[in-house]
Amino acid sequence: MSQKSITAPHKGDLAIEAHGLVKVFGDNRAVDGVNLKVGTGTIYGVLGPNGAGKTTTIRMLATLLRPDAGSASIFGHDVVKEPQIVRQLIGVTGQYASVDESLSATENLVIFSRLLGLGRAEARRKAAELLEEFGLTEAAKRPLKHFSGGMRRRLDLAASLIAQPPLIFLDEPTTGLDPRTRNQMWDTIRRLVQSGSTVLLTTQYLEEADQLADRIAVIDHGRVVAEGTVDELKASVGTSSLQLRVQHPQDIEMARRTIEQVLKVQSSISAEASKITAPMGNADQVTDLLVALRDAGIPLAEMSVQKPTLDEVFLTITGHGAQEDTHLASSESNKVGGAKA
Ligand SMILES: Nc1ncnc2c1ncn2[C@@H]1O[C@H](COP(=O)(O)OP(=O)(O)OP(=O)(O)O)[C@@H](O)[C@H]1O
Ligand SMILES: [Mg+2]
């Protein structure tokens, strides 16, 4: 019986390659032709607002959901034709959501280790090591049902690391975590990649993509609307970004028109209450702008020129902010879990 062998992935190969992935739910094209190329040994960020299709994309790549059209391969193995091989190459956080609630964190990790073929002593050692790394040592003996959301998430990641898969999908790994825990998570993710793993993470946090990702795909309404390194995406908005606040909110429209004329940009100017944000090709234009605003009789409360944030990149690309509708986020939709590989 011949079976395609699993070759060890090496740098330069593509960890993920997807062409025209589509998933339709009823009349909702949740994923509408997504193309992705993720290099081995890198951190790839998929950035998008609620409902953009991030989780659905991951579920197709992780063999948890069958694409309606398009194709994808993981280290060269087709997700539809070779799901068994793909599953041996990946880890998905949330995948272990159905662990035994009455068992302690240690017991759960030991069971996973044993299932993966580790000896008893090795399994104990691995569990202790991971709990230490994730700051869960204190809680190690507590049953899972008494864990907080943040602790659960860390244990989830710990469990998916036992096997040290070459490719790890992290679906919103830090949503809902406090800043300190989030930073720990970031360190762990960086260490994972240093030790040879490839990571694809989804996030709604522009800062997270900025901090971690080598490359980013911005996804909106099921489509990749921009792709590149963080610097490339930032450069697409202009070299700098103007932030300005007018003293009188009624001046905002006039100020906006003045900025449009002087900077010769339109589409990506955002104006809300008394604040305007606009891309600037050349920081020198600020002198002309200040003169024009004074001539128009518009007093300013505040003005700054800075490097664009990813938020502004998102606004420029999609015409709306990344954080829109975030309050609709439900912890359910952020989980890849449920279906087991
Ligand atoms: N099993 C399903 N059945 C029907 N519709 C679904 C299903 N899963 C997702 N959807 C819909 O597909 C779209 C994309 O959802 P998805 O969960 O992929 O978005 P997301 O980018 O992960 O969003 P979030 O940031 O909220 O996690 C949404 O409109 C969602 O309502
Ligand atoms: Mg999601």
Image (tube, grey):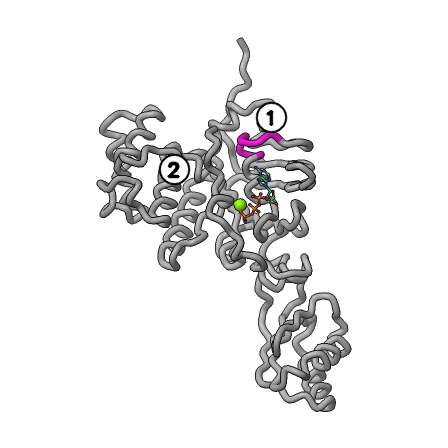
Q: Nearer the viewer, residue 149 or 216?
A: 149
Q: Is mark 1 within 8 Å of ligand 1?
A: no
Tell me which residue sits at (36%, 58%) in the image: 180
The amino acid at mark 1 is Val
Locate residue 195, reporting x and y percent.
Answer: 41, 41
Residue 42 visible, this orientation? no
According to the picture, the residue beneath numbered tag 1 turns out to be 80
Element on which disc 1 rests: loop
The amino acid at mark 2 is Leu
Locate residue 220, reporting x and y percent.
Answer: 64, 50
Q: Residues within 10 Å of mark 1 (few under 14, many from 20)?
A: some
Q: Earlier in the sequence, mark 1 or mark 2?
A: 1
Residue bounds of the magenta highlight: 60-66
Q: Which mark is residue 21?
A: none
Q: Residues within 10 Å of mark 2 (few under 14, many from 20)?
A: some
Residue 16 visible, this orientation? yes
Tell me which residue sits at (69%, 32%) in the image: 69
Q: Which mark is residue 161?
A: 2
